[in-house]
Amino acid sequence: GAGVSQSPSNKVTEKGKDVELRCDPISGHTALYWYRQSLGQGLEFLIYFQGNSAPDKSGLPSDRFSAERTGGSVSTLTIQRTQQEDSAVYLCASSLGSVNGYTFGSGTRLTVV
Amino acid sequence: QKEVEQNSGPLSVPEGAIASLNCTYSDRVSQSFFWYRQYSGKSPELIMSIYSNGDKEDGRFTAQLNKASQYVSLLIRDSQPSDSATYLCAVTTYGNNRLAFGKGNQVVVIP
């Protein structure tokens, strides 16, 4: 596609529920990243996929968070048993490689009530 | 020490003036440097990249890199109200598969 597409744009969920966030990167971009941004805070790295290599999961805050990337394209970030501190904007980005700048999607605003 | 630091508070500049933003980074082997602009409620947008020491100009924006002093700066000339946004500095290093972001500097251009 022309840009990085994320869905849903907004998600309100009850504490304890599982949520799935989707990211469709720019066609041909081999690198895909997930970050999150809490209100007034900087961008926090979560996970990185590069081609068929094993993902870099070093930023995932707990084992409730997981992500997969199918067929080297679409990625899904799953948060199990959501907590209020998970409330944030989850941003997906893609690039041609780790030394290139990223193109971000418009984000998913997650609110846990 | 944080990987990328942007310590200045909100910056207010009159329309037409120069806005100057600074960023320092901790890893001496950092190789790629970026500036992103983020409007309120929107996602970050890449506006400048720089890889070697010196200045790089693109329109009203100039990025400056000094690897010896480990800082990168952004100048916005002839500031416009549409430049009012938060500017994020980002750095990547060889072998590190991600960008590290600073917390950002808010710029307010006063008409």
Image (cartoon, coloured by chain):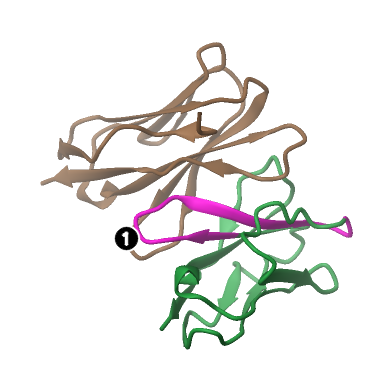
Chain colours: A green, B brown
Task: Give the residue displayed 55% in from the left and 25% down from the top.
Answer: B26
Disc 1 on helix, strand or loop? loop
Q: Which residues are magenta?
A: A35-53
Q: Is residue A40 left or right of residue B1?
A: left
When asked about the image quadrant of residue A72, the answer is bottom right
Q: Is residue B84 left or right of residue B73?
A: left
Task: Give the residue displayed 54% in from the left and 33% down from the top.
Answer: B3
Q: Residues within 10 Å of mark 1 (few under 14, many from 20)?
A: few
Residue B107 placed where, x, y %? 26, 43
Tell me if residue B5 comes above or below residue A102 in the rendering.
Answer: above
Residue B88 placed where, x, y %? 43, 43
In the picture of the structure, the residue carrying the numbered disc 1 is: B40
- Disc 1 marks a residue whose amino acid type is Ser
Give B77 or B87, whichever is nearer the viewer: B87
In which quadrant will I find the N terminus of chain A? bottom right
Tell me if residue B95 comes above or below residue B72 in the rendering.
Answer: below
In which quadrant will I find the C terminus of chain A? bottom left
Residue B92 placed where, x, y %? 64, 36
Residue A8 lies in magenta, yes or no? no
Count of numbered tags: 1
Task: Give the residue displayed 77% in from the left and 35% down from the top.
Answer: B95
Q: Is residue B77 left or right of residue B46?
A: left
Q: Is residue B19 left or right of residue B37?
A: left
Q: Chain of mark 1?
A: B
Task: Give the residue displayed 61% in from the left and 27% down from the top.
Answer: B51
